[in-house]
Structure formats: structure tokens, C-alpha cells
Image: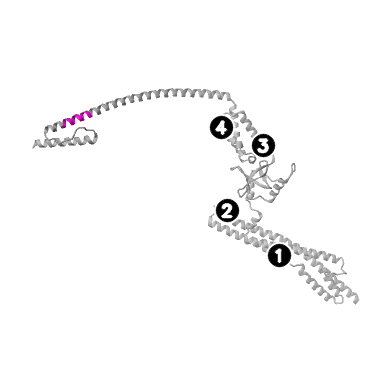
Amino acid sequence: MLKRLLIGFALLFAFSASAVAQEAEGESDIEQRKASNLAELLELIQNRQLHWSEKNEERERQFSQRRADQAQLLEDAKAERARQERISEELEATFNKNEATIGDLQDRLNERLGTLRELFGVLQQVAGDARGVFQSSLVSAQIPGREEWLEDFARKMGESSQLATIAEMERLWALLQEQMTATGEITTYRGVVTSISGNQIQTPITRVGAFSLIADGKYLNYNTATGKVVELPRQPASRFVSGARRLAETEVNEIIPFAIDPTRGSLLNLLIQSKTLGERIQDGGGVGAVIIILGLIGIALAVFQWVYLSRVGSQIRKQTENLDSPNESNPLGRVLLVGTQSKDIGVETLELKLSEAVMAEIPKLTRFLPIVQVISVVSPLLGLLGTVVGMILTFQAITLFGTGDPQTMAGGISTALVTTVLGLCAAIPTVLLHALVNSRSRGLVHILEEQSTGLVAQQAEQAGRILD
């Protein structure tokens, strides 16, 4: 029984070792066969042991060889590290030596420069300041590209600590002199103007020093960000534009009034943003329109009546110089005709007829005056109404948006103020014209009454003589 177990265990070990060897190496040259007795099994095991011992010896030999190679590589790496350490020490020594040399040379340079260092510092500061001036100057519209060179010059002296050459200092001086000369000149050159629609137009541009640019009788603006000359969205008031037109048409050495912008565009931008008279009148809204219409009607009626009274007054004056020949073309002549045609009637009857004739002339002499008077009274009341409407709009804006943004309240306040001004502008001239026309008409009526009273007195005197 024990013998059979031993044989089975040996066969199992032999087959397992054979399978492992075939899968791992794939080089077994021993023929697999079944052992029929213990002798063959022993021989098979011995052959396997001999094969594996040869394999192990080969592996040990390869491992030893590799270990020797690794040791050699380690020695080479140590030698390389030592060499690099020596190079590092040499470079560090060279660096320290160069540092000392640079320090000595810098001290020698500072000693030799002396006051020149202050000069170069001033040059750098002047170049920086001049760049800012040139960038915002209208002269750069005619002579572009100067600020780029100044920027490079200042950066070179500041960052790399390079010294300025004589040629660079001369160029800086020439640029400054060119700027000073240009600020006192009025010159015309051909340039490109960017219109409101974005079109590029080549046109003559007149530069007034460093203050204003003009083309085709219109003011222009210089955009410092893009370096372009652009057309204004709209021109300032006509009194300024008229000066620009005269400047464009003037001859050499001719003096004309012209408005300049000493702020180089700031005031001009504020002027074009301010509202014109028409835009301010539009702020009055419907109430403002009614006030304007009533004011124009009142002024027109008053002027028309004044012209009529002036013509009638001239005719009456001529009639007073010739009372014996009354003319029906004027009120006094018609009153005198009534007196002439009623010489044979009584004094009381004549007085009544003359009073009737005078009363018939009064409506023509006093027409339109009540309307003008009403307009003079109603206009300021309408202005007060517009003020109230504007304040209502203002408080509505405050309720909706608060008081943080004044522009939300500007519309209502503008309406209130404009309507008040329009009401006063309509009331003041209508009151004055009503007073003048009324005084004129009263004077003419007084002349008619005076002449009619004279006729009555003359008739009474003649009647008294007849009785005597």
C-alpha cells in the first residue's frame, strides 16, 4: 500500500514539474513518457533535476554579470557627479568674481557720470511728460507718430538703464521745439476726416494752434485713443460756426473773431451736448406750445393794431391841419362831416349826433385790445400750469426710480422751468404792446372828442349871436 502511494506521488510530481517547465520555458528536450516501474521513474526525476540545475546555474551567472554592470554604472555616476560639482564650484567662483567686477565697474561709471546722471534722469522725465502732452495735442493729428518714439526712448532709459546718445537728445529737443512752434501757428493741411457715418474723407483741415480743428467751416474733434480726426455729432451754436466759416474763407494776415477751446475739446463737447433753443422749447410740451401760439397771436394782433393806428393817426393829423375840408377816409373827417351837415339843428341835437359819430369810430380804434389783454393775463397762468405739470412728472419719476439719478428728474424739472419762462416771455411783450396800443387809441379818441366838443361849442356860440 505504501509502495503504491509513493509511486503515485512521484508520478504526480513528475508530471507537474514537466507541465510547469513546458509553460515557462518552452525548451524542454526531455521526452514525456509514463514510467512503468520505479527504475524508470527514478531516472526521469534525476534527468529533471539535472536540467533544472543547469538552468539555475545559467541564471545565477547572468545575475552576477548584471550585478557587475550595475556596479560599474554606479561608479560612473559618482564620477560624473564629482565632475559636475567641480564645474559648479568653478562657475560659482567665476560668478562671484564677475559680481565684484561689475560692482567695481558700476562704481567707476557712477564716478565718471557725476552730474550727467541727473541730466539723464531729467531727459527721461521730460520724455515721459512730453509723450502725454503730444498724445492729447491736436498737433499730433497733423504730425502723428511722435509719442511712440518718446515712449521707446523713456522705456529704454528706465528699464535697461542705457544712456541717451547725442542724436537722441537732439531729436528730443527738436520735437519739443516743433510742438512749441506748432501751438502758435494757424495752418492748413490735407488730412483724413471720419464722418458720422464712418466714411473716410480726404479734405483740407485748418488747425488753430493746439486748440481747434476746422474743415469745411465746421469744428472737428481729435480722438486721442484712435489718433483720428472725427466729425462732431452736431455743431455748436451758430455764433461759433460763423466764426469757423469766416476763418476758412479769410485771407492771410486778416484778423477775424474766432472761438477757440483752451481745454482741447472738453468745452466743445459740453457745448454740443447742451440743448439748443428749439430743443428747450420742446421740453415745454403741450402747455408750452399753447403758450407760444397765444403769445404769437397776441403780439401779431397788437402789432397789426399799432400799424393801423399809426396810419389813422397820420390821417387825423393831416385832417387837423385842414378842418374846413373834411375827408371821409379818416375818423376825424367823418366826425367833421356830421357837424357840417348838422349846422341848422339845435346844439343838443348836434352834440348827440357828434357823440354818436365818435362812438361809431371807437370800436375800430380799440379793436383787438381786449384779446391782447386777456392773452397777457392768461400766459403767465398757463406757465404756472406747466410748472405744476412738470413738478408732477418729477415726483412721479422720484416715486418710480428714486433720487439716485438726477437725470430721471431732469425731464419734469425742465418742463416746469421752460413753461414758466415761456409764460413770462409771452406775457411781458403782450402787456407792453397792450399798454402802447391802448395809449395810442385813447389819444386818437381824445382828438375826436376834442374836435366834436369844439364843433358843439362853435354851434352854441353862433346860436347865441343870433339870439342877441
Q: In front: mark 2 or mark 4?
A: 4
Mark positioned earlier in the residue sequence (1 or 3): 3
Mark positioned earlier in the residue sequence (2 or 1): 1
Mark positioned earlier in the residue sequence (3 or 2): 3
Residues in magenta, as a range: 44-55
| Residue 263 picture location, percent across and down | 64, 43
Per the picture, the main secondary structure of the magenta-coloured stretch is helix
Q: In front: mark 2 or mark 1?
A: 2
| Residue 402 picture location, percent across and down | 53, 55
Amino acid marked by disc 1: Gln
Q: Give the vertical position of 89 relative to 328 (above or below).
A: above
Residue at image position (70%, 61%) is: 296
Disc 4 residue crowd, few under 14, some 14–19, many 20+, Cα 10 Å? some
Mark positioned earlier in the residue sequence (3 or 4): 4
Query: Farthest residue toward the left?
Result: 1
Q: Which residue is mark 4?
A: 156
> 126 or 72: which is nearer to us?
72
Q: Give the vertical position of 71 relative to 296 (above or below).
A: above
Q: Which residue is mark 1?
A: 373
Question: 247 left or right of 399?
Answer: right
Q: Which residue is mark 2?
A: 407
CB contact under 8 Å: marks 3 and 2 = no
The quadrant holding residue 37 is top left
Q: In front: mark 4 or mark 1?
A: 4
Label placed on residue 180: 3
Cα distance in 3D space between marks 2 and 4: 48 Å
